[in-house]
Structures are given as C-alpha cells and as structure tokens.
Amino acid sequence: MRVSTAMIFGNGLASMQRQSAQLLHTQQQAASGRRMLTPADDPVASARALEVGQAKNTNALYQTNQKTAAEALAQQESLLASVGELMHGVRTLAVQGGGGSLNEADRRSIASELRQRFEQLVGFANAADGNGLYLFSGFMGGTKPFSGSVAAGVAYAGDDGQRLQQVSASRQLAVSDSGNEIFMRIRNGNGSFVTSAAAGNAGSGVIDGGAVTDPARWNAPGNGKDFSIRFAVDNSSMPPQTTYDIIDNASGNSLLTGAAPGPAPLPRVFQPDQAIVLKSQGGEPAFDFGAQLVITGHPANGDRFEIDASTSQSMFETLGRLIGALEGSTGTSAGRTLLANRIGAALTDIDQAQDNLLRVRATVGARLNEIDSLANAGEALDLNYAQTLSRLQDVDYAEAITRLTQQQFYLEAAQKTYASVSGLSLFNYV
C-alpha cells in the first residue's frame, strides 16, 4: 500500500479534528451540566425526559391552581366566620330584647342596632374577591347577589352554581358556595316543624320550638304536618281548669276524639311546662306523629297555637322578623306574651341559621384539608419528576471530568505525533 504525504497529513488532521470535537462535546456537557446536549446523544432518554418534563409542568400548573383554590376558600371561610360572629351578636341582642326589665324605648334601641347588623349582613353576603367577582353569586360572579331592605325583604339574584378549580388530574374542587345555600335556604323552626302563637292570644302562654322524637313517624306519608292546639279555661272550678285539643287542620277533626272539635271542657287537661305529645293517650284514637312541644305560662280561653311543617327562611327574613317584633312590641300583658313568643321563634330560627353556617364552614374546611393533602402529594410528585429528569439529563461530573482528561490526553498525543510525522523528509538522509 502506497502511503502518500497527503494521506499522512489528511489522516492526522482528521484525527485531531475528531479528538477536538469529542473534547468540545465533553467540555459542553461539563459546562452545561447536561448529559444530553441534543436528542441524538440518547434518543430513548431524550424522549423519556420530554414526557417527564411535560408531566412536571402539568403538576406545577395543578400546584398553582391549588394555591388559588386555597386562597379563595380561605377568604370564604373568613367571611363565614364573620357572619357567624354577627349572628351570635344578633342572638345576644334578641335575648336582651326579650328581657322583662326593658321598656319599649330600650327595645326600639335594640331594634335600631339590629338594623345596622342587617345592613352589615347584606354587606358580607355581597362580598367580592380580589378579581371583583362576588363570592356568593354562584356562576354569576359579575352579578351582585343580594339586594333589599328590612321592610321589603332581600332577594337573591345569583344562581345555585359552584365555581370549580382543577386541582389535580382527576379532581375538580368547588371554590365557592351559592348564596342560596348559605343565606336563603335555611329551615325555620326546629328544622322539621315550626311553632307559633296566634296574634290574638290573651293569655301568658309561650310555646317553645318543639322537637321530633321519632323522625320516621313525623315523616310518615299520613302526617299532614299541620296542627292547631286550642285551649279552653273553665273558671267555674276552683282552681280554674285549663284543657286543650289538638286539631288536624287538613281534616278539621280533633286528633283526640276523631270527630269535629267539641265544646269545653276539651279532651286533655293542660299542665304548664309539661310536654304536649302528638301521640294518643288513654282512650284516644290511635295516632303517633313522633313530636312534642312545651307551652309555659297560662293560656287564656280561646288561645291557639299552630304547628306547621318547616319551610325555607332566609337569614335576612329571620332578622327582619326579630326587628319587627321589637319595634311592634307594646307594654300590655298580651303584648309582652306575643313578644316572648316571637323572640322565642326568632331564637330558634337563629340557631338554625348558625347550624347551617357551621355545616357550610365544615365543607369549606374539608375542601381546605383536601387541598393540603393534594399539595403535599404534588410536592412529592414534583420531587420525583425532578429526580427522574436529573437521572436522565444531568451529567455525571466525575465521569465527565475523567473523560475530558482522557480526551485531552488523546488530542495532545495526536498533535505530537502529527508534528513528528509531518517533519519527516528523505532529504534529511541524503
């Protein structure tokens, strides 16, 4: 084989260029910290790194959404806590307004303060977030949800929607609650039925909120949930005897006799502070509606109390009725009794509103806890993605520096041999 001078020079140059390219590639790896400078360096690892990188970016987006959701829920929880404190103050004022030592001017002063609380409650219900969206208007974030007054009542202009945030690949979390559920759809009375005293009652009887003793019987199909308790007083006996009847308003018949209500004396003898049960006793026709109530004081002849199924009543209506009761109170004995019944009903309704607030706050707290769990899982997942990307992409500095030293040695050897070979000439031996 004939080895020409041109071949010697060409091969030597190609060798040095190859060694220089390898040295430069290793130098770039060490400088950038990346093992793969181009996909050609490791096609399989490059494709895998692309997938992991995309998953890592998606996880980062979910983490951002989790923070946004947590901020929205924390703001809502703070507002609901403020509403709870406001309703607690309203309850305190209601108890104070029912005190026997107050005169009518004192009660009107309390009613004036309650009007301020009413406006404050409307303000809380119309709260907006940092983006100007109303918190409690459902999907209609740009619509002011509540408007009205004590006299006209408050109307809701939002909807029942809950705004959702994608907080993980498989989870959308509600970051708002409808104002209907928080402020409007609250069961009045004890949640199953509501008791009330007729406005024309002349006695001192005051009815409590009652209680359901057997939910299955109370909710049975045959229960019309509409009853009246009528009283009669026989002043000819000593002491005067008070009797009562329980009327099924749907049929107009007495539950205690099974026939139309009769004249006094009525079927049952009344004892103050003793439970009146909606259940047959002694020789009465069989019935059991699983409920009872207590009437204190002494009802007068002809006094009447009502039992009706619970309906939805807003916080605003509850507060408005309390204000009306205090502002309309009179100093007469019948007026004081009517006020006591209305304040008792208001206290029961306030308790229902507070229970509803606690229920909503519990759901908000559960969602915040879920976000915390998702955030912890997201952080762990992000760390796993980072470790995987590091294994796929990052250079091993010990190996790279060793290889760089070796390649530098190879290049120096190629340069020295090239210099030696290129200096050969036959004329040196002639």
Image: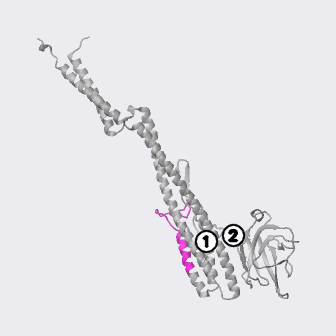
As helix, strand or loop, the secondary structure at mark 1 comes to helix
Camera-side residue of 200 and 242: 242
Q: Earlier in the sequence, mark 1 or mark 2?
A: 2
* Crowd around label 2: few <14 · some 14–19 · many ≥20 (10 Å): many
Please say whether residue 303 is visible from this viewpoint: yes
Residue 315: image tag: 1
Q: Quadrant of residue 203?
A: bottom right
Which residue, given by chain and number where applicable, does mark 2 sit on? 190
Q: Quadrant of residue 155?
A: bottom right
Residue 357: image tag: none
Horizontal and vertical percent position of residue 1:
26, 11
The amino acid beneath tag 2 is Asn
Residue found farthest to the left: 430
Horizontal and vertical percent position of residue 107:
60, 84
Camera-side residue of 233 and 240: 240
Horizontal and vertical percent position of residue 139:
55, 60
Give the left or right position of residue 93, taking residue 430 as reference. right
Magenta stretch: give its range. 113-140
As helix, strand or loop, the secondary structure at mark 2 comes to loop
* Crowd around label 1: few <14 · some 14–19 · many ≥20 (10 Å): many
Give the left or right position of residue 105, taking residue 66 as reference. right
Please say whether residue 174 is visible from this viewpoint: no
